Amino acid sequence: MTKNLNILVVGGAGYIGSHTTLSLKVAGYNVVVYDNFLTGHHDACFGDHLVEGELINKRLLIKTIEKFEIDCVIQFAALIEAGQSVIEPIPFYQNNVAGTISLLEAMHATKVKRLVFSSTAAVYGNSNSNELLHEDKPKSPINPYGESKAIVETMLESCVNAYGMQAIALRYFNAAGADAKGRSGERHEPETHLIPLVIETARGVRPHINIYGTDYDTPDGTCIRDYVHVSDLASGHVQAVKRLFEIDHPYFDPINLGSGYGYSVKEIIESVKKISKQEFKICKGKRRHGDPAVLVADASKAKKMLGWHAQFSNIDQIVRDAWNFATK
């Protein structure tokens, strides 16, 4: 019975981690949140227990796993800003790679074999076509952030083969939105994601929103991305945990979590205008280096392997929930 299973959510006070904790609780799991609050928030801790600590602290991780008799781990704890990773790569490798090594060592020492890993579509790098991105596409990250996630995926495959683990790497596309009840939402410092930036502009927090490139080979000339409601991502993790408990042999699988549909920058802006009922200044600039025209997930594997599909990822739903959280 799931009510007897204990899940350790590392980075559980962060954006996706907090929403996943809420979904795990609804599904009947006991949840222990482990976070250092570098980017997480105390008011976003929804687990049964909280342990404040560093990912690199293997001794505390072992103590936590043993104390709470952990059955499965979800690893969210990571630095995520791709642009910053180019400027300061060492912290990304130190936290995302070395930190996950510490976690894997703690799991191995305590004989915990099940892990859901928070990966990213950034492992694919740039796409040279407008075709949906499938998990079989070779990994070719273009920045240290994506590279750090790709390295961990490789490590997981090795650990699965060596230690008989069961692991799933969930490759997110563009996480967006907020909890429909307003309990948690996107609060990055500094904010770099498009939807919260446009919302800040509509609220008057920012003087204008920039569009980087209006001459792409897309219907309106702006980049198209696959936006996934954070509550959909959360349910994907619950399904991944359930999947791991169905398997008793060495297992590793990378799985996309995306809606399978793309929205352009201009469509995002128009949705925010509609939901907020605000007009605001838009500035058009040149393309940013490395920005592909279209990045959209092939999400068929998630449906097949996890029984998962995006339910709340209509752009107006995403924007409405994000707007309500930002303005509450």
Image (cartoon, rainbow, N blue to C red):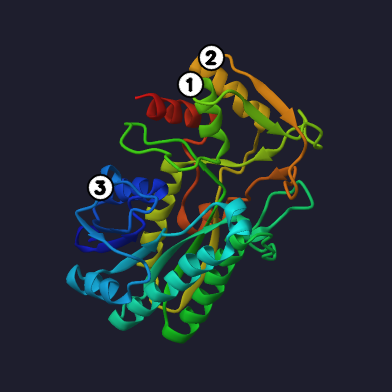
Q: Which residue type carries mark 1?
A: Arg
Question: Which picture quadrant has residue 216?
Answer: top right
Which percent across, then down, holds residue 41? 32, 46
Foreground: disc 2 or disc 1: 1
Q: Earlier in the sequence, mark 3 or mark 2?
A: 3
For residue 82, side relative to residue 169 (left or right): right
Residue at 72% x, 46% y is 291
The residue positioned 65% from the left and 45% from the top of the image is 296
The circle drawn on residue 46 is 3
Nearest the eye: 48 or 96: 96
Q: Which amino acid does label 2 sit on?
A: Gln
The correct choice, above or below, for 103 with respect to 261 in the image is below
- The residue nearer to you, when weighing 269 against 116, is 269
Q: Residue at x 54, y 24 (%)?
A: 201
The disc labelled 3 sits on which kind of residue?
Answer: Phe
Instruction: Check contact, mark 2 vs mark 1: CB within 8 A.
Output: yes
Task: Residue under label 1, please give it.
Answer: 203
Which residue is at 39% across, 75% downward? Answer: 102
At label 2, counting other C-alpha atoms closer than 10 Å, the crowd grade (few under 14, some 14-19, many 20 or more) is: few
Relative depth, front residue between 204 and 185: 204
Helix, strand or loop at mark 1 = loop
Instruction: Give the mark nearer the N terminus: 2 vs 1.
Output: 1
Q: Which residue was labeled with disc 2?
A: 278
Residue 31: percent from the left, percent from the top?
A: 25, 57
